[in-house]
Image (cartoon, helix red, strand yellow):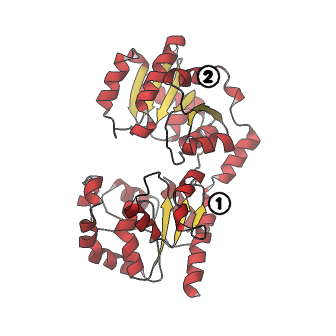
Amino acid sequence: MATFELVTGLQRDQQRRCVFLVAKGTPIADEAERLGIEVIDTGELDASHWTMRRRRNPFFALKRLPARLRLLRRIGSPFIVHCNDILEMQSFGFAAKLLGGKVVYHHHALNRMIFPNRLLVGVADAVIAVSEICLQAVAFVGADKARYVLNPIEVGLVDRGAARSRVCAALGIDPSRVLAGFVGNFWERKRPLFFLEAAAAMLAKRPDLHFILFGRRADYEIEDLEARAQALGLGERITFAGFLMPAEDNIAAIDLLMAPAVNEPFGRTPIEAGLLGTPYVATDDAGHAEIGRRWGGGRLVPLQDEPGQFAETALAVLAAPDEVLLGPSARAAVVEDFSIRAHAAAVEAVYRRLEGARQA
């Protein structure tokens, strides 16, 4: 999402030509074309279905190097390759350097900086970090290379009542219930099991609650989470919804966003909740801690707290949401900080510095 928003801003506000190097026939390619972004087919559709371990194999990168060099030559020179993860640095970072291109690495993860990762990141001419904790993780490249730039997060005007009606109708939920939600794929660090345990503790004290998990399988299978929910006594008071469109409805429809994730690089959902007028409760850790302290809109729960303690904080926020919701001026400040225009301008400044260095 952040990449699509960045490219939208670069093309619209900075008049910069942007090209997606991606396999045709993938959801990313389809969405890029829908948004009017130029797409060059990598011809690697088969690899998009491989496991990450297989795709990270350096022998695959070497095998594809000649084809990737041809793709980059099609773009024309000079060019900047902007990579969003370590795998893309392996895929196109080295290829770009071989052709004299500049490379930007956009760091938005807290993966371990083992030697191969440090080597790949070190190839970049500039590193953009999306949060303070991400910036700390790439400090080894030097202050002259690394810069902190907030990801763009924009949401349109959403009628919360209408969103609630749409979501409840789609999922068969009684709209009179108080709705608490989890938004994110079911990775270990997102702590969906923690969410279920907190939900059970909340339901014991507020029987009018209904819980919705908007997300897809990852480290956890949905069937395993469903079985755990039933064992905790959540019964028909929990719904596994996948993701509904428009995405804003997932947060606007609920009365409380519960974000128990740990080691979160930044996280869009608390910011989106603040803009949509939905209070949140999040773990006081990593990127979520930064969000809670800098922009507010919800309440942070100490990292060491158990699900029952998380539940107590969540119930307190539900009882008095106005105590944490952003006011008009605070919301306007968030809109400006996370605007596509501001993000594109900051990234364009990085590009121009690299282009100036090339000319010098």
Q: Is residue 344 above or below residue 234?
A: below
Q: Residue at x 59, y 49 (%)?
A: 154
Q: Secondary structure at mark 1?
A: helix
Quadrant for the C terminus in the image: bottom right
Give coordinates of residue 32: x percent, y percent: 42, 60
Q: Is residue 318 left or right of residue 197?
A: right
Task: Determine which of the numbered discs, if any, sits on residue 203 in the image.
Answer: none
- Which residue is denoted by mark 1 in the rendering? 342
Q: Who comes first in sequence, dot 1 or dot 2?
A: 2
Which residue lies at the image location 56% right of the left edge and 51% below the top edge?
133
Q: Nearer the viewer, residue 246 or 198?
A: 198
Q: Where residue 66 appears, x then y in whole percent?
A: 27, 78
Q: Nearer the viewer, residue 92 or 71?
A: 92
- Pointers 1 and 2 in contact (C-beta within 8 Å): no
Going by the numbered disc 1, the residue's amino acid type is: Ala
Counting the numbered discs, the total is 2
Residue 6 lies in quadrant? bottom right
Q: Position of residue 167 (x, y in %)?
A: 47, 30
Image x and y of residue 110, in percent: 47, 51
Does residue 243 appear in the picture of this structure?
no
Seen at 33% across and 78% down, the residue is 69
Q: Residue furthest right?
A: 329
Disc 2 packing (10 Å; few <14; some 14–19; many ≥20): some
Q: Nearer the viewer, residue 237 or 354?
A: 354
How far, Cα to Cα, is label 1 from label 2? 33 Å
**Does residue 280 appear left or right of residue 85 in this picture?**
right
Residue 91 quadrant: bottom left
In the image, 12: left or right of 211? Answer: right
| Residue 85 visible somewhere in the drawing | yes
Q: Which residue is mark 2?
A: 318
Tag 2: amino acid? Leu
